[in-house]
Image: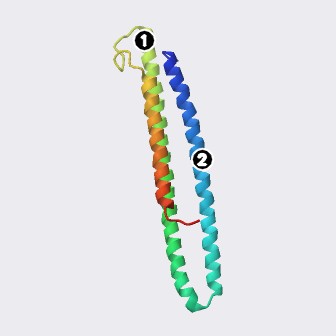
Amino acid sequence: MFSNCSTYYLFVEYYINQLIHHQRYNLQLDVINQLGQRIEKQLKQHESRLTTLPRTEASSLRTTHVKLTRDYRLVEQQYKNVQLDVKRKRNLAEAKQRETVRLEEEEKERKRRGDTSGLLGGDQDISESAMKWQMQIQEDVSIYIYRTVCLCLNGIDF
């Protein structure tokens, strides 16, 4: 399966990184969902308090409540868009990996038959370059998630 030991170690490192990134991503989702639940709860509590206040007092607070609710819904929508974007990028990376495996199998079959022309022209190691490419995509996705969540949550006081 692997042409040399360094490819094997790169492969193992890649899958360990995948597991770590997947766990980190799920942890980030859990934290964001918990924060969202707390915000929803606070918005509902604030809304119920508004019903007990006199009209003059409630008027300015209601305006603030509407603005906060609207801002939260915008952040919530951005969060859902980020989730969809991450899912799309992961699917793309998985498709690329499947294609790489297919190309590797074709290359092995050509070598087995003695055909030296090959798809990639010689000794280029498909596994190594594919794993590096996927590790870069995973890192890009992680950075994108982190930056987007920071932007979405910037200024929200908990």
Residue 20 higher or lower than 106, as above or below: below
Type of amino acid at the residue the image marks with label 1: Lys
Which quarter of the picture shows residue 51? bottom right
Type of amino acid at the residue the image marks with label 2: Asn
Q: Position of residue 23 (x, y in %)?
A: 60, 42
> Which residue is at 55% across, 40% downward?
21
Residue bearing mark 1 = 111
Q: Position of residue 5 (x, y in %)?
A: 52, 16
> Which residue is at 50% across, 63% downward?
75
Which quarter of the picture shows residue 56? bottom right
Distance between mark 1 and mark 2 Cα atoms: 41 Å
Q: Position of residue 94 (x, y in %)?
A: 49, 36
Q: Quadrant of the C terminus?
A: bottom right
Residue 55 higher or lower than 62, as above or below: below
> Which residue is at 49% across, 49% downward?
145
Does the rendering let one see residue 81? no
Residue bearing mark 2 = 26
Does the rendering let one see residue 140? yes
Q: Is residue 91 left or right of residue 58?
A: left
Q: Is residue 50 left or right of residue 83?
A: right
> Which residue is at 50% across, 55% downward?
149
Q: How is the image coloured?
A: rainbow
Q: Residues within 10 Å of mark 2 (few under 14, many from 20)?
A: few
Element at label 2: helix
Q: Are marks 1 and 2 in contact (CB under 8 Å)?
A: no
Q: In terms of sequence position, does the residue under pointer 1 or pointer 2 come before the other?
A: 2
The mark total stands at 2
Q: Is residue 76 left or right of residue 34?
A: left
Residue 67 higher or lower than 93, as above or below: below
Element at label 1: helix
Mark in front: 1 vs 2:
2
